[in-house]
Image (spheres, rainbow, N blue to C red):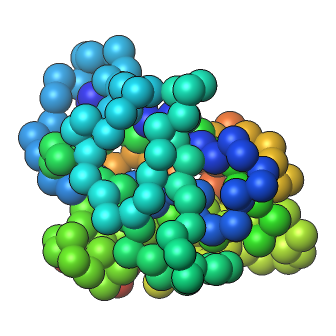
Amino acid sequence: MSRYEITTYHNNRDSMKILLLTTLIGLAPLVSAAEKDWIKLYNGQDLTGWQTTGNWLPQKDGSLLIQPRPGEKGWQRYGAYLWSKKKYKDFVLHVEYKYPPGGNSGVFFRVGDLKNPVQSGIEAQILDSTKKKGKMGPHDHGGIIRTVGASKNMSKNPGEWNQMIVTCKSHHLLVELNGEKIVDIQLDKTPMKDR
């Protein structure tokens, strides 16, 4: 299976007020399972290969920063999605990110309608769940929205690096967060079976 990597994070604490990362991955053929090299999806310089309606700004250190536009405050649906121009069906996606206190975002994939990713895709939640006690739900960090919560809370504190690896092969979905497997499901047995 091919491996894809996007190292995308927010590094300016003064502007860490909104969504950190929203990535949309669509559909395409599976590349050779023997391939072990990662394919960089973000070149660290500009948004070549990406589409967005958001205010995503490449930084000198190779990261991406999303800034609120005039009138945007706190957590709102800005339509600030960032999605790959290429489509992928089966994939391994490695994402590194930081979030501010209360940060809320997600990694979207297998999106059927880019104008309505929330209803037509699958979302692995990115959320500041560091203070969450007890069972994790589908809307907590690492959970699959409307489907299943993470098996444990592996969230790092706001301002620290998180590493998420999403593996999607046919109907099998695996999510690892900060080195721990937290989701391992068959999508055809969930509300996401048609995606």
The x, y position of residue 58, in whole percent, is: 47, 38
The x, y position of residue 77, in whole percent, is: 48, 81
* Residue 122 sits above or below residue 57 on the image: below
The x, y position of residue 9, in whole percent, is: 59, 43
Q: Toward the viewer: 103 or 194? A: 103
* Residue 134 sits above or below residue 130 on the image: below
Give the mark count. Answer: 0
56 left or right of 149 in image? left
32 left or right of 173 in image? left
Q: Residue at x 26, y 81 (%)?
A: 116
* Residue 68 sits above or below residue 74 on the image: above
User: Which quarter of the picture shows residue 164?
Assistant: top right
Residue located farthest toward the left when viewing the structure as drawn: 29
* Residue 11 sits above or below residue 141 on the image: above
Q: Toward the viewer: 187 or 9? A: 9
Q: Residue at x 67, y 79 (%)?
A: 74
Q: Is residue 183 visible?
A: no
Q: Toward the viewer: 124 or 117? A: 117
Q: Quadrant of the C terminus?
A: bottom left
Residue located farthest toward the front when viewing the structure as drawn: 70
Q: Quadrant of the N terminus?
A: top left
Q: Is residue 10 visible?
A: yes
Q: Residue at x 56, y 26 (%)?
A: 60
The x, y position of residue 108, in whole percent, is: 38, 63
43 left or right of 84 in image? right
Q: Residue at x 54, y 34 (%)?
A: 59
Q: Toward the viewer: 15 or 27? A: 15
